[in-house]
Image (tube, rainbow, N blue to C red):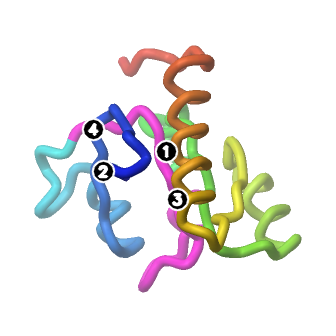
Amino acid sequence: MKEAKVANILHAVTNGRDALDFLHQRGAYTASPRPDLILLDLNLPGISGHTVLAEIKRDPSLLTIPVVVLTSSESEADIVKSYEEHANCFISKPVDFSSFLDIVSRIESFWFSIVRLPQPG
């Protein structure tokens, strides 16, 4: 993300349980901030990205946070299921690192420079 020159503060977790704990401010993540945007991989260890997405979109306190599914999957079933679970967009990760950096930069530009997001509260 540093190479993509992402200007926003980034928090990362490595599995579905930690993602949900971070979002619900539980356990080791009690002081975690509410994110403005969630980049979600579907291929998370433990609890799947689809399960995390469904829980985010069921929770009124998290519902307005945009979720960008950014995953290696190109499966039509994953695309359809992600939108059925109310993902805000689905992006397949490019294999090439420089293309990945370009995608990350475009995501940041779109969601933080062009889109108007609701203020929490």
Q: Looking at the image, tell me whether mark 2 or mark 3 is earlier in sequence order.
A: 2
Q: Which residues are magenta?
A: 33-55
Foreground residue, 97 or 93? Answer: 97
Q: Which mark, by number, is residue 59?
A: 1
Q: Quadrant of the C terminus?
A: top left
Q: Are marks 3 and 4 in contact (CB under 8 Å)?
A: no
Residue at numbered disc 2: 24
Q: Disc 4 and disc 2: Cα gap in Å? A: 18 Å
Three-letter residue code for mark 3: Leu
Q: Which quadrant of the structure image shows residue 70?
A: bottom right
**Badge 2 local density, few (<14 within 10 Å), some, or many (20+)?**
some
Q: Amino acid at mark 1?
A: Asp
Q: Residues within 10 Å of mark 3 (few under 14, many from 20)?
A: many
Give left or right: position of 25 versus 79. left
Identify residue type, mark 4: Ile
* Residue at the spot of label 4: 9
- Nearer the viewer's eye, disc 2 or disc 3? 3
Residue positioned 53% across, 18% down in the render: 113
Q: Position of residue 76 (x, y in %)?
A: 88, 71
Disc 2 from disc 3: Cα separation: 16 Å
Secondary element type, mark 2: helix
Earlier sequence position, callout 4 versus callout 1: 4
Q: Of label 1 and label 3, which has the lower sequence position?
A: 3
Q: Name the mark on residue 40.
A: 3
Which residue is at 34% across, 32% downward?
A: 7
Which is in the foreground here, disc 4 or disc 2? Answer: 4
